[in-house]
Image (spheres, rainbow, N blue to C red):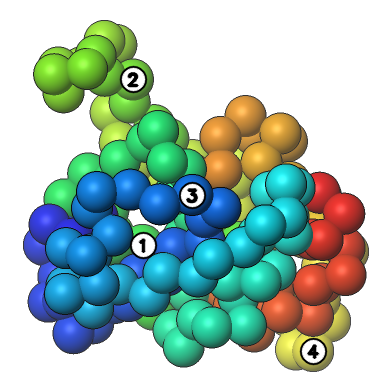
């Protein structure tokens, strides 16, 4: 996550977890916000973390996944070029424990995984799309924070 091709000052990392690791000190020294949270539901942790995020676009990352180094550059470009983009789901690539690809699906934007809004009309499907089980993987979800923040109660139930 900290090896992105965009400048480190252009993104923040907020971690919610209910356990400690040997990496916590290193992450803190890299400017990662670590939030202790005892809730067991994915949505509760996301709703908690959203309160501490400053950026307008939020990308989720499960603890058993990783981001390709160019992910945030692609995401930033998509949200900048599409100011009404509310939600984006991207393709994913399975890897083995040593980082070797297991399939030939390239990283890219899932054209069916986009939701745009017009004016102040928030799409009523956004809460469903934020459910990681809808697409099968939370680490492929990116959302405009200002919209997701309006659905904190719904998120807490996921």
User: Helix, strand, or loop for circle 3?
Assistant: loop
Q: Earlier in the sequence, mark 2 or mark 4?
A: 2
What's the residue at 64%, 34% (across, down)? Answer: 135
Q: Which residue is mark 1?
A: 75
Depth order, front residue of 79/29: 29
Q: Secondary structure at mark 4?
A: loop
How far apart, in angstroms, are the residues tagged by discs 4 and 3?
A: 39 Å
Callout in the foreground (2, 1): 2
Q: Which residue is mark 4?
A: 120
In the shown orientation, is residue 84 left or right of residue 65? right
Asked if the residue under mark 3 is in contact with the one under mark 2, i.e. CB atoms within 8 Å, the reply is: no
- Marks 2 and 4 in Cβ contact (< 8 Å): no
Image position of 144 with respect to 100: above or below: below
Kind of element beneath mark 2: loop
Name the residue carrying label 3.
19
Q: Which mark is residue 94?
A: 2
* Crowd tier of the residue under label 2, counting other residues whose Cα lies within 10 Å: few below 14, some 14–19, many 20 or above: some
Q: Distance between the Cα atoms at labels 1 and 3?
A: 29 Å
Whether residue 35 is visible to the viewer of this picture, yes or no, is yes
């Amino acid at each position: 996550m900290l090896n992105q091709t965009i400048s480190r000052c252009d993104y923040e990392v907020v971690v919610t977890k209910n356990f400690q690791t040997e990496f916590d000190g290193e992450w803190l020294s890299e400017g990662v916000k670590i939030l202790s949270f005892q809730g067991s539901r994915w949505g509760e942790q996301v709703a908690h973390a959203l309160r501490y995020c400053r950026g307008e676009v939020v990308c989720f990352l499960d603890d058993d996944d990783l981001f390709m180094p160019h992910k945030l550059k692609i995401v930033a470009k998509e949200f900048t070029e599409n100011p009404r983009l509310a939600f984006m789901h991207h393709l994913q690539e399975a890897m083995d424990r040593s980082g070797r690809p297991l399939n030939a699906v390239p990283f890219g934007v899932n054209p069916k995984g986009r939701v745009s809004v017009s004016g102040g009309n928030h799409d009523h499907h956004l809460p469903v799309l934020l459910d990681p089980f809808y697409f099968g993987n939370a680490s492929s979800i990116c959302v405009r924070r200002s919209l997701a923040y309006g659905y904190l109660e719904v998120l807490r139930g996921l």
